[in-house]
């Protein structure tokens, strides 16, 4: 394995996943939320309430952040938030965003 392959591998295993998210109570008191920021300036807001897409089914809604603001122009969210996500779907989206 050369230096570039090793560096790519190290970056891959350092990627944050759903298990790294630290949820707190939603300010409205009826759900959970968290924000996670990545080294590339992007991040995610992950929310589950009865009013989010899929929240009433125990699923998550994700918004892509850039410099701590919602960023719609990206290939993950495609102009919106992404809902109806399982934990593994949130991880997949997080990995994509960390590669931007």
Image (tube, rainbow, N blue to C red):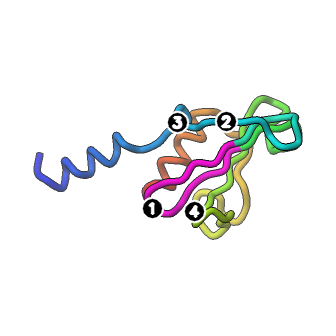
Whole-number angstrom distance, CA of label 1 to CA of label 3 = 17 Å
What are the residue bounds of the magenta stretch? 34-46
Q: Nearer the viewer, mark 1 or mark 4?
A: 1
Residue marked by disc 2: 23
Q: Main secondary structure of the magenta part?
A: strand
Q: Position of residue 42 (x, y in %)?
A: 53, 60
Query: Is residue 12 found inside the magenta-colored segment of the image?
Result: no
Residue under label 4: 75
Q: CA distance from mark 4 to mark 3?
A: 23 Å
Q: Which quadrant holds the N terminus?
A: top left
Q: Quadrant of residue 49?
A: top right
Is label 1 in a helix, a strand or a loop? loop
Which is in the foreground here, disc 4 or disc 3?
3
Please report whichever mark, 1 or 2, sits nearer to the chain's N-terminal start. 2
Q: Secondary structure at mark 4?
A: loop
Viewed as shown, does residue 16 lie left or right of 3? right
Please tell me which residue is depicted at 47% across the width and 47% down the height of the picture. Answer: 95
Query: Cα distance, mark 1 to mark 2?
Result: 22 Å
Dot 1 or dot 3: first in sequence order is 3
- The earlier-in-sequence mark between 4 and 2 is 2
Residue position marked by numbered label 1 in the rendering: 40
Identify the residue shown where x is 59% and y is 65%.
66
For the residues marked 3 and 2, what is the alpha-carbon distance in whole angstroms? Answer: 10 Å
Q: Earlier in the sequence, mark 4 or mark 3?
A: 3
């Amino acid at each position: 394995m050369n230096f570039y392959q090793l560096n790519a591998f190290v970056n891959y295993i350092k990627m944050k996943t759903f298990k790294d998210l630290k949820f707190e109570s939603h300010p409205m008191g009826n759900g959970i939320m968290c924000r996670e920021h990545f080294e590339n300036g992007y991040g995610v807001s992950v929310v589950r309430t009865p009013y989010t897409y899929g929240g009433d089914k125990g699923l998550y809604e994700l918004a892509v952040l850039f410099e701590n603001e919602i960023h719609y122009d990206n290939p993950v969210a495609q102009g919106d938030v992404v809902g109806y996500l399982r934990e593994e779907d949130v991880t997949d989206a997080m990995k994509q965003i960390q590669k931007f």
